[in-house]
Image (cartoon, rainbow, N blue to C red):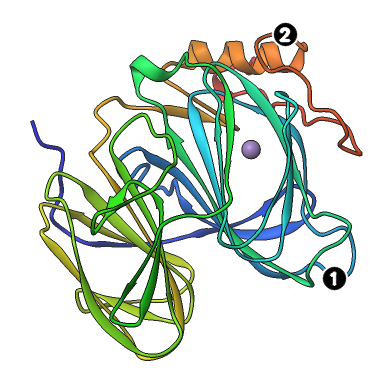
Amino acid sequence: MSLLHAERQLLPATETVLGEGMRIRRALPTRLRRMVGPWTFMDHFGPADVAHGDGMRVAPHPHIGLQTVTWLHRGEILHRDSLGSLQTIRPGQLNLMTSGRGISHSEESPLQRSPELHGLQFWIALPDESRAVEAAFDHYPSLPVIERDDLRISVLVGEMLGEVSPARLYSPALGLDMEATQGIATSLPLRPDFEYAALVSEGEAEFDGETLAPGSLLYLGGGRESLAIRTSGAARLTLIGGEPFETPVLMWWNFVARTQDELSTAVREWNAGQGDYGEVHGYDGARLKAPTPPWDKAD
Ligand code: MN
């Protein structure tokens, strides 16, 4: 049975704080929509002045059931994880971390850095059969780029116009970054079996005639063969999509699972230093403590 919805939804992002004080916009999940395909989380951070102060500081924390996708418009982030990875990411590059059944990581602005940080982090839920895969971290120093009607398209994950991202995925999905340096008008072929959503990080754009600016996610639904995109000036756009995720996911804090029991176990094990989360070395600060889920609170 198809879970595709043809209707569009303009979904306001939630303003929240990431790590130690960086204000961000969370476009997924929102009250009105939890997922777009396997995409279950979408943070837009910055543009933030990181020339003064500590910049981004997100202390060691765990994940299960997902892949994290990090993509920068400007600036740098230093990633450390429990596999021993130590990797600075810069614009044009992709960090893809696969939690499998457990990993932990930290993210921080490196000491030597550009004055501004601006970017996106997404989570992709792992399908049932891949939730227990080995944890992995992949850094892709460059990605396929398509020039189409003056729109510069980077294929972060999936395939567009014959260009395939090397990023390893466990379910069919698409993630595109699109940069216009002037007004553009183009259209992209879409897969009718995917549902899609668009985000604007800078400037303004029209998707099939619907105007979108930073601060909202435009859910585009499924059953589409193409998408018309238009800007009147410079803009930075993201398109995500994928097959509607058939399994309902439950999320608590940094965990993606299927049942409250799994989430409770993850919280308990992380806080007790147990489980498959390993240890992050080199971060200057204590690891984060998982908050108790409401269903485990005594009343
Ligand atoms: Mn994380």
Q: Amino acid at mark 2?
A: Gln
**Which element carries disc 2, helix, strand or loop?**
loop
Residue 65 point in image, percent of width and height:
48, 24
The part of the image, by quadrant, that contains residue 51 is: bottom right
Residue assigned mark 1: 51
Judging depth in this view, the residue of 58 and 169 nearest the camera is: 169
Residue assigned mark 2: 274
| Screen quadrant of the C terminus | top right
Q: Would you say 200 lies left or right of 119 here?
A: left
Q: Amino acid at mark 1?
A: Ala
Q: Residue at x 56, y 61 (%)?
A: 92
For ligand 1, give the image quadrant. top right
Taking the image as drawn, is residue 299 in sight?
A: no
Judging depth in this view, the residue of 263 and 190 nearest the camera is: 190
How far apart in space, not on screen, are marks 1 and 2 (Cα)? 37 Å
Residue 110 point in image, percent of width and height:
83, 54
Q: Residue at x 41, y 27 (%)?
A: 126
Q: Would you say 108 lies left or right of 297 here?
A: right
Residue 84 point in image, percent of width and height:
75, 27
Judging depth in this view, the residue of 217 and 130 nearest the camera is: 130
